[in-house]
Image (spheres, grey):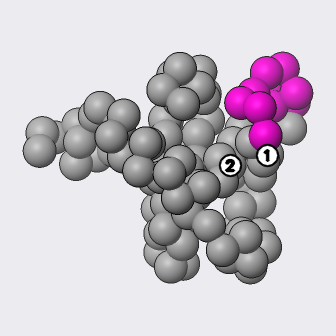
């Protein structure tokens, strides 16, 4: 495991496949405006600024979560927040990169 893997920025293809096999929900943490400009089909938009207030709603989905954003930085923060709240999650990184791995 390299430093990029440890930080959540390494090759995620295997982990993405594992999460999608478990019917993971994709949550895009960009702003509503950014999301409207393009996003992964069937992903949910919950901006990073409000994600903590949506923890209970996310838990009710009862599915693992892949978070994404534009570059992977905001999704890394969201991953930390969700993980800290007991939600199985992974940082999918930038949404366009994630989309190409689905």
Q: Main secondary structure of the magenta part?
A: loop
Is residue 38 within the magenta segment?
yes
User: Residue 7: horizontal and vertical position, in percent?
Assistant: 28, 46
Residue 32, picture quadrant = top right
Q: Are marks 2 and 1 in contact (CB under 8 Å)?
A: yes
Q: Is residue 55 visible?
A: no
- In the rendered view, tell whether residue 55 sits above or below residue 92: below
Residue 81 is left or right of residue 53, and the answer is left
User: Residue 96: horizontal and vertical position, in percent?
Assistant: 59, 21
Q: Residue furthest left?
A: 1
Residue 58 is left or right of residue 74, and the answer is right
Q: What is the span of residues highlighted in magenta in the rendered image?
A: 33-42
**In front: 19, or 49?**
19
Under tag 2, what secondary structure? strand
User: Residue 98: horizontal and vertical position, in percent?
Assistant: 53, 29
Residue picked out by circle 2? 27
Residue picked out by circle 1? 45
């Amino acid at each position: 495991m390299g430093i990029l893997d440890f930080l959540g920025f390494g090759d995620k293809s295997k982990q993405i496949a594992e999460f999608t096999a478990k019917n993971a929900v994709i949550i895009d943490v960009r702003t509503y405006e950014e999301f409207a400009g393009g996003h992964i089909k069937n992903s949910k938009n919950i901006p990073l600024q409000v994600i903590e207030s949506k923890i209970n709603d996310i838990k009710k989905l009862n599915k693992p979560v892949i978070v994404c954003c534009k570059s992977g930085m905001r999704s890394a923060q969201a991953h930390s927040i969700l993980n800290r709240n007991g939600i199985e999650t992974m940082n999918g990184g930038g949404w366009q990169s994630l989309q190409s791995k689905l």
